[in-house]
Amino acid sequence: MASLTDPPKESFRLGMLIYDTRYRSLTIQIVALFVFMIFAAWLINNTLANLAEQGKTIGFGFLSDPAGYDINQRLLDYSSQSTHWRAAFIGLLNTLLVAFMGCITATIIGVIVGVLRLSNNWIVARLMTVYVEAFRNVPVLLWIVFTMAIMIETLPAPRAFKGENPTANMVLFDSVAFTNRGVYIPEPLFSRGLGDLPVLPDRDSPACAAPEAGAPLNDSCGVFQISLDLILIVAVLAAGLYGSSRIKKRADRIQNATGDRPTTWYLRLGVVLVPLAIVLAILGFHLGYPQLKGFNFSGGTYLRNSLIALWLALSLYTAAFIAEIVRAGILAISSGQTEAAAALGLRSNRIMSLVILPQALRVIIPPLISNYLNLTKNSSLAIAVGYMDITGTLGGITMNQTGRELECVLLLMLVYLAISLSISGIMNWYNDRVKLVER
Amino acid sequence: MVQINFVRSVMEEQQAPPAATTGFLGWIRQNLFSSPLNAILTLLSLGFVAWLLAHSLPWIISPTWRATSLNECREILMGEGGACWGVIRERWLQLMFGFYPSELYWRPILAFLLLLIAVAPILFTGVPRRVLVFSAVYPFLMPWLLWGGPIWGPVVAGLGFVIGFYAHQFLKPIAGGLAAILTGVLLAILWWLFLAGPTASALSSVLPLALQSVESRAFGGFMLSITIGVVAIALSLPIGIVLALGRQSNLLIVRSLAVGFIEFIRGVPLITLLFVASTLLNIFMPPGTNFDIVLRVIIMVTLFASAYMAEVVRGGLAALPKGQYEAADALGLDFWMANRLIIMPQALKISIPGIVSTFIGVFKDTTLVSIIGLLDPLGLSNAIRADQAWNGIVWELYGFIALLFFVFCFSMSRYSMYLERKLQTGHR
Amino acid sequence: MTKSVFVGALALACVSAGIAAAGTLDDVKARGKLNCGVATGVPGFAAPDANGEWQGFDVAVCRAVAAAVLDDPSAVEFVPTTGKTRFTALASGEIDMLARNTTWTFSRDVDLKFDFVGVNYYDGQGFMVPKELGVSSAKELDGATVCIQTGTTTELNLADFFRVNNMSYEPVPIETNAEAQQQYLAGACDVYTTDASGLAATRATFENVADHVILPEIISKEPLGPLVRHGDNEWGDLVSWTLNALVAAEELGVTSANVAELAAAAGNNPEINRLLGTEGTLGEMLGVPADWAVKAISVAGNYGEVFEKNIGETTPIGLARGLNAQWTSGGLLYSPPFR
């Protein structure tokens, strides 16, 4: 009987590579690998030949030269004497900033619109449909340009705030100014601040020379600087939240044991707020208000119109897609769930937030990830409004000025690839956590 | 005896429903003012719509259709705000066709109409199946119509497929499936590389059937967007199917190559791929080769679209019940036959809405080519503003372009939704 | 199925494309067309009109070269290029020459391996501000928001200028002139900076021209000129001397009106005779017919005529000759002798 299950013993023939299923897969794979390697070698060979003909060499040394141009929005210190590397990094931070803010607002708007599209208010549902269709069917580049143009044309110029009878006024007790250059809001300041901690400082450089007593450290010392005030505040806040959660757990225990829940809200609030208020008072916290000086407002935090326009346009555009996903997710939940929740006596908005949305979330998350990726990739259109993201610095001015297209484009692609892969990695990890465990 | 009835013996006439719940008023109450919150939302929405119309209508209705320059518009409007529509009247043909010779406009129009006929049997079930033959011919007809030149180029290119197909048919009984396919493909490639060119030139010297040739630099406006979109989607479909099969495959190397390609393309923005098209693609090709920017862009957009197409097809493959695969195996079909006869027809049918939305996405993304200097509608709007007569016009051009994009994309997305509904009932 | 189209198109493209390594002059003659890189749209310098015909000052240079080599000013394929794509287009052989407001700088000439064959417009970076700001000098711009058109040397000049004068500023980089103009007019930036010619062209289209002033400071030298690939000297010579012919024609008084008459027979000015090919063998030395300069000049006239027609004071752009006048009238235009 054993002879039936044993494969027939025969010597290996060349034809078996194709006809024998045991070897065939191996053959196909090796052939595929060879073809791929030959193709790659051909590309590299061509590239080297072409570059040699043009008299260029491949090298990333040019990135260490001074960039020579200025960047308006920088999260870290930067000047025109900084290197191209640093310019690229500043651009990368700007990309991440707008992508992060965009994802959050797109989700919020998308969920609201998705829910409102199912509203039984006819006109609201219609308006939302118009919004979704208008944004989904017109290119995002046009929307970005539109948003920028609307901001520029409708908001007043800083000049309008000037003079005896200004045509525009600041809002919220003269603390916030909406101008067509952007929005100026108050900034937190500390009169007895702890200063900044430079990371990886170069002790020999003149920027890190010991400052005069009382004077702040030079901004350009170190790769970047961390505000000690911020660290302290975050630490105090975290400790407060931890204390608050301990109090809640204790209340839960008491409730489980006795049935009575002690009133703890003032304790929990106090544990968070009191230490924070003390720390802020010690640091000398106050707000710095924007004031019109010369050509522009000075003081305060300045959100540039390029950032706002890009952020708004990307959020609204992506939100239209997210709204459709949310709507489909909600419709995927059977109406029995709504009815059961209504039978329990929940009101319609609580049905939505407690029963429907949490279940719909599991359907929504996978397509949501790809929309986050799209938003991040679409942020590369920032050059249309002059927002200096990494496409604007590394793939824009640096590439123009140095003429190193190959290196710049390759680096740019790698950076975006890394961003995309990490976003999808994080979101997939989250998706695995919230996924229904199927039994 | 007095009869006392505690129960009504005669049915009361049915009363009309309260006036507030029927008719127009009832509809309004139910749909607009069912609760205080709804009432507030309704009023807010109405106010918003009224505000929008009050601001945009006077601007849109503007008697400037005949103006020949921005200054003339300003004179007509005499300081009042209003659009300057003269620019659309003067340049709309340019926005549609770019620099395509105006006496040849019939060619792109014909190509577009034939495109509708060619895709009809795929998109609508009521069309006779024989039209599919035309769909197969169309990919060769379209480039000839758009670019012109001797007809023999597309004919010879099509012959390659015929040669490959017959080689496969002839060899299959002799050498077996895989060898036949490999030989067929190899023969076709050999034909294209070495014999197609000479044959085409020989044929055209014997029988010169040619249209006036048009350089692809003359392409512009919406014609350029549609050409890039249609060609990229058509080319990406076969590549996407191969990639999707590769990604589903059990073979480790094949799968990792497919996954690597798909994830790489999907991980980078289209604009970086267009930078590659505009600055690097010539460097990757053998020294001396040089193709024009429209072709390079089409190549990169095709690669871009095929990664997305692969994911759409993969979705279709995953949606098929496992029983279909097992049934195909049980019938003793090999991999190619199972895919050709059972898997792909069903999977592709399920994927059509996804394919259409990929097309909408690619079509919208073609606006990005304006960043690398191609004169698509957005690029042209910039070039039009460089004309002193129209320098300073913004909203009219953008509005016109946005409207056209909306019309194209909205009709396609409506179609795709209709299809989705139809397929849902058909499938369950 | 559709893959064949791709392969076919690829094959056709490979066949039809010229090989960059061979002499560009021979390529252009064999092709019968000149591929000339221009801007996607700069008022007065390069822009397509309603019929799709390219017009402008840079375009005229392309047409003159096409006329000199191919005897047909319309045998030009205009390739619109952006600041990013122009150099690769030239380096890869996609275009034969680039006439796109390109500043002649050391690194472009030496590091990027191009040859600037001359200067067709001497420009410089300037500033435009609204009159109501009351600014009369660029030195008063401390703290201003400045709109810059990117993709050129402008950003670098601006950074240097403000750094040298120890002033702060807020750069707003903008891709196209149209958007920059919109932001400037709405007051989203205080200052608009680009080449002075571009400023003048932009200002000319404003509703109230008198409300805006161009500041006297010119903060950079921007010699704009056509360029070709490094190492192809025959082609470089041809483009260079075509440009020189236009300049020399103005100096010698040869115009589109009288060029045919002057070229009919040798006159008594030997330099005109040599220029127009009625004497000597200059054309033969360049590898083109003897009347090459006549063809180039008859397209749109000499340098002065081209200037007046596209950007001169009679056009809406209204640029004065300034530095771009002949050396005999105090400008920088100075053609080497035709000898």
Image: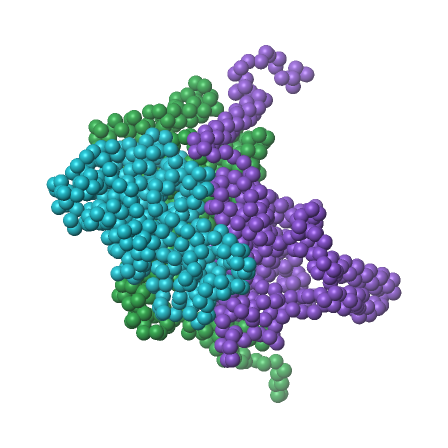
Quick check: B338 above or below A152?
above
User: Which chain is rendered green in the image?
Assistant: B
Q: Is residue B179 visible?
A: yes
Q: Is residue C14 left or right of residue A364?
A: left
Q: Which residue: 34% across, 63% down?
A: C204
Image position, residue C54 (x, y; %): 29, 50
Q: Colour of chain A?
A: purple
Q: Nearer the viewer, residue B195 or C251?
A: C251
For the view shown, which residue lies furthest in the top direction?
A: A11
Q: Colour of chain C?
A: cyan
Image position, residue A181 (x, y; %): 51, 65
* Colour pattern: by chain
Quick check: B126 above or below B85?
above
Q: Which residue: 68% across, 16% down?
A: A2
Q: Which residue: 50% across, 80% down?
A: A165
Image position, residue A424 (x, y; %): 61, 46
Image position, residue B144 (x, y; %): 30, 39
Q: Nearer the viewer, residue B362 or C191?
A: C191
For the view shown, which residue lies furthest in the right direction?
A: A258
Q: Is residue C269 left or right of residue A217?
A: left
Q: Is residue B209 visible?
A: no
Q: Is residue A95 left or right of residue B72?
A: right
* Location of the N terminus of chain A (image quadrant): top right
Q: Quadrant of residue C97?
A: top left
Q: Nearer the viewer, residue B225 or B122?
A: B225
Q: Nearer the viewer, residue C265 or B153?
A: C265
Q: In the rendered picture of this protein, how many numbered marks are placed on residues?
A: 0
Q: Which residue: 55% across, 38% down?
A: A60
